[in-house]
Amino acid sequence: MHVGDDFTGLQELSMGVTSIRDPGNDDKRTIDRRHRAAAGALLFPHVYPSSLIDGKGPYTAQFANVATTQAEAIRLVDKAKANDFTGIKFYGTFDASWLPAAIAEAHKLGLHVHGHIPVGIRPMDAINDGYDEITHINWIAMQAMPDDVIKASNGIMRFEGPGRYAKDVDLDGLAINTIVGAMARKHIYNDPTMVAFEGIYVPENGDMAPSYAPFVGTMPPATERGFRTGGFAVPKDLTRADYRASWAKMVALLQRMHQAGVPIVAGTDGSGIEIVHELEIYVQAGFTPAEALAAATIVPARLVGQEAKTGSIKVGKTADLALIEGDPSAHIADLRQTRVVMLDGKLLDADALRSAAGFSGRPTSSMH
């Protein structure tokens, strides 16, 4: 998740999240929070940040470090390493011809490489250039999108293209088989952020996405209203049913990837309270509850190279734990019912954390 502010830490800890992979943010703030947390001045989960690098143009990412030459891109990779970042995330306006050199530099420095796909190329090109991970499910679907979508994939087309065409993609066709096979073979991760796309394609405009339903009545009214913005407006020649059919195909694509052995890590791309619903979608896509839980624990620990220290409960590992009322191995929704959280061996009261983060009570366990 992209860390919001100091309160994000309290919110995530209240949900039992003790580690966050931040795929791009304001680097200065990331470093500032790290220093304050280390000094005991800020209560926050462990953060494994990526430095976001983009090119210059009308769609440049908000917090991006902007490269206008290949040499500048390589310097930004070096700077990320110097600032103790764990990864590099490339974005849609980055010049695709600079990828091989920039990725080679990142790998030389031991940095994890992931991102959106630069405009004009397909995800297989980025994999062949050295991506370790493709961020978001829509970029996997992009392998099967028409050329006109690829030519404009750094703007709204990255949502509208899959919304229009994913429903008709053949999951047994050459494009999808090629990318899923390559990702399984090379252990290329995907952080599908299913909740983000469900929120775009499924709810009517003005409805609340399912991620937020368990928290209704516990958030400040203005915050709750913000979650009622609902889905994207559908283009004139399509219907909401078309977008929903494309969403269903993305869930089927996730199932196909999981069956093939592509490593999946759970992300939200939202405010962070969506994480348990993300795992509920994985269960809908054929994951066992244990496999869904692994996507939020040991698999991302491997991705950031921390599996020897965290990501599972084992003698000698860091005591980052959550005590749940319920049985997530049977009902993944029970994960919302955190009661005690332990960060680096220190006990925290989940209800006190919720209250400090601005929630007036516990979420409901929906979807039983």
Image (cartoon, helix red, strand yellow):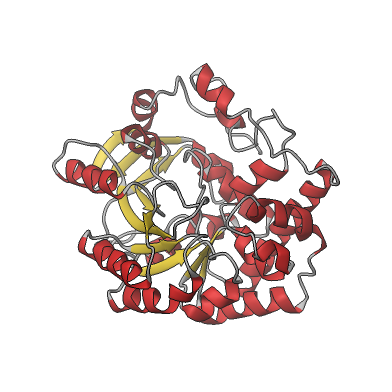
Q: Position of residue 244 (x, y in %)?
A: 78, 47
Q: State whether residue 259 is above or below residue 246.
A: below
- For residue 167, side relative to residue 24 (left or right): right
- For residue 280, side relative to residue 44 (left or right): right
Q: Position of residue 238 (x, y in %)?
A: 84, 46
Q: Position of residue 256 (x, y in %)?
A: 68, 68
Location of residue 207 (image quadrant): top right
Residue displayed at 45% across by 65% down = 114
Q: State whether residue 104 is above or below residue 267.
A: below
Residue nearest the observer in this picture, 19 or 162: 162
- For residue 135, side relative to residue 306 (left or right): right
Q: Is residue 283 visible?
A: no
Residue displayed at 37% across by 68% down = 69
Q: Is residue 252 visible?
A: yes
Q: Position of residue 325 (x, y in %)?
A: 47, 37
Residue displayed at 51% across by 24% down = 223
Residue nearest the observer in this picture, 62 or 250: 62
In the displayed orientation, state which residue is furthest to the left: 39
Residue nearest the observer in this picture, 316 or 95: 95
Quadrant containing the C terminus in the rendered view: top right
Location of residue 185 (image quadrant): bottom right
Q: State whether residue 43 is above or below residue 268.
A: above
Q: State whether residue 213 is above or below residue 173.
A: above
Residue displayed at 43% across by 57% down = 297
Location of residue 309 (image quadrant): bottom left
